[in-house]
């Protein structure tokens, strides 16, 4: 049975005519192959018909059968590559096109298909990278960090429990903090901060605790940090004032703790007490407001006299042992 040649390597016949012919040609080639199963050309032509019919798996099978009978059939490599390309097996397709190009390096169609494979692989790689970046950005951080400040330091903490000292590495530079922690053989945690203001690296320290990792960044001067990291532009310098100390800096709201302590002390001072409570408060006030000598005198006289004498005169009690001296209507007993 004679079969009219179907298509060429480039276009597989003009598209409109080829699409109309493809089913009939495929049937005729199938009949021909039953009579001539060792005809490489028939397999190659039927692969062309399968490609037009979008039967890409069948196209690849026929192209491989053709190559098994004629390993130097460049057109069969082309048909195999086109089928693989449409099934998105771009690496396999590129290999097929390159094998065919070795046999027929004068045909530009191989160059065109190889370029298409390279572009498809590049797009696929970029899509994978974009997907990984998006997935990483959408995941919440596994470990949190926080910070607060004093007049002399900025303290940064990483909330990682039971970290080993040998697994923690911290590097300080003038404008950066770089900390890494080995969590497991497969996982590392890294915190790299571009700091708002300069620090003194050689006077900055880190400490590994059971509940966290603490890093103390030494300030070169008493400047208040409005935030931890630089976000562009030149930060404004605000000098630290002790009466406006606020902790912690990362809270949603701030509270003036020194002012609160002052208010509590003022309330305690103005509280009206009676009897022993008033007397005890008086002694506490004297001790709190007294000099070091007054406090030593009060401690020594009270301890040595068994609580029966309370003196603020260090010049007196500092030279002698204070004897027990109970009130006139009471007797002191040692237990």
Image (tube, rainbow, N blue to C red):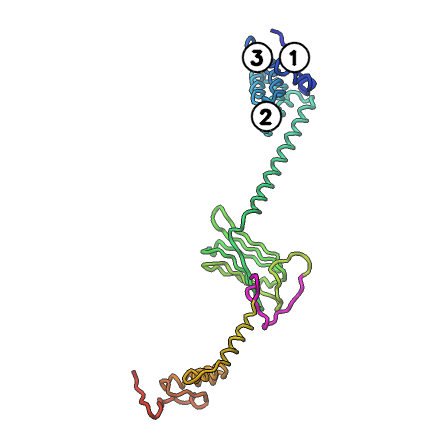
Query: Can residue 303 be seen?
Result: yes
Find residue 279 and report its image quarter.
bottom left
Q: Secondary structure at mark 1?
A: loop
Boundaries of the magenta span? 235-254
* Neighbour tally class for label 3: few under 14, some 14-19, many 20 plus, Cα within 10 Å: some
Lower sequence index among marks 3 and 1: 1
Give the distance between the C-alpha atoms of the residues marked 3 and 1, in whole angstroms: 14 Å
**What main secondary structure does the magenta stretch of the protein show?**
loop
Classify the position of the N terminus by image quarter. Answer: top right
Q: List the residue tagged with mark 2.
A: 84
Measured as percent of width and height from the top left, residue 294 is found at: 47, 85
User: Are the two marked residues, 3 and 1, in contact with CB atoms closer than 8 angstroms?
Assistant: no
Measured as percent of width and height from the top left, residue 243 is found at: 59, 73
Which label belongs to residue 5?
Answer: 1
| Residue located at (54% from left, 72% from top) | 260
Tell me the mark number nearer the camera, choosing from 2 and 3: 3
Q: Secondary structure at mark 3?
A: helix
* Neighbour tally class for label 2: few under 14, some 14-19, many 20 plus, Cα within 10 Å: many
User: Are the two marked residues, 2 and 1, in contact with CB atoms closer than 8 angstroms?
Assistant: no
Q: Secondary structure at mark 2?
A: helix
Query: Can residue 8 be seen?
Result: no
| Residue located at (46% from left, 90% from top) | 315
Give yes or no for residue 238 being in the magenta stretch. yes
């Amino acid at each position: 049975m004679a079969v009219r040649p179907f298509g060429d390597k480039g276009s597989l016949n003009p598209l409109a005519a080829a699409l109309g012919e493809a089913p009939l040609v495929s049937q005729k080639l199938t009949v021909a192959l039953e009579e001539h199963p060792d005809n490489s050309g028939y397999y190659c032509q039927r692969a062309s018909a399968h490609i037009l019919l979008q039967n890409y798996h069948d196209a690849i099978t026929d192209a491989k059968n053709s190559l098994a009978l004629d390993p130097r059939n460049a057109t069969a490599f082309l048909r195999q590559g086109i089928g693989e390309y449409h099934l998105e097996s771009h690496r396999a397709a590129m290999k097929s096109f390159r094998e065919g190009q070795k046999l027929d390096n004068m045909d530009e169609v191989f160059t065109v298909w190889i370029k298409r494979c390279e572009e498809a692989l590049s797009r696929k790689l970029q899509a994978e990278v974009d997907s990984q970046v998006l997935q990483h950005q959408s995941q919440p951080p596994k470990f949190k960090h926080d910070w607060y400040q004093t007049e002399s330091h900025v303290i940064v903490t990483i909330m990682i429990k039971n970290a080993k000292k040998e697994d923690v590495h911290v590097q300080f530079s003038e404008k950066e903090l770089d900390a890494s922690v080995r969590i497991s053989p497969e996982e590392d945690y890294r915190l790299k901060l571009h700091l708002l203001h300069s620090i003194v690296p050689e006077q900055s320290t880190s400490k590994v605790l059971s509940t966290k990792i603490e890093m103390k960044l030494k300030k070169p001067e008493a400047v208040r940090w409005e935030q931890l990291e630089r976000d562009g532009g030149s930060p404004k310098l605000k000098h630290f004032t002790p009466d406006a100390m606020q902790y912690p800096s990362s809270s949603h709201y701030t509270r003036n703790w020194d002012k609160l302590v002052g208010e509590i002390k003022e309330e305690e001072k103005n509280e009206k007490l009676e009897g022993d409570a008033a007397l005890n408060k008086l002694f506490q006030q004297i001790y709190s407001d007294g000099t070091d000598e007054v406090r030593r005198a009060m401690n020594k006289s009270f301890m040595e006299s068994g609580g029966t004498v309370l003196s603020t005169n260090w010049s007196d009690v500092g030279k002698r042992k204070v004897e027990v001296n109970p009130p006139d209507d009471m007797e002191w007993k040692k237990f």
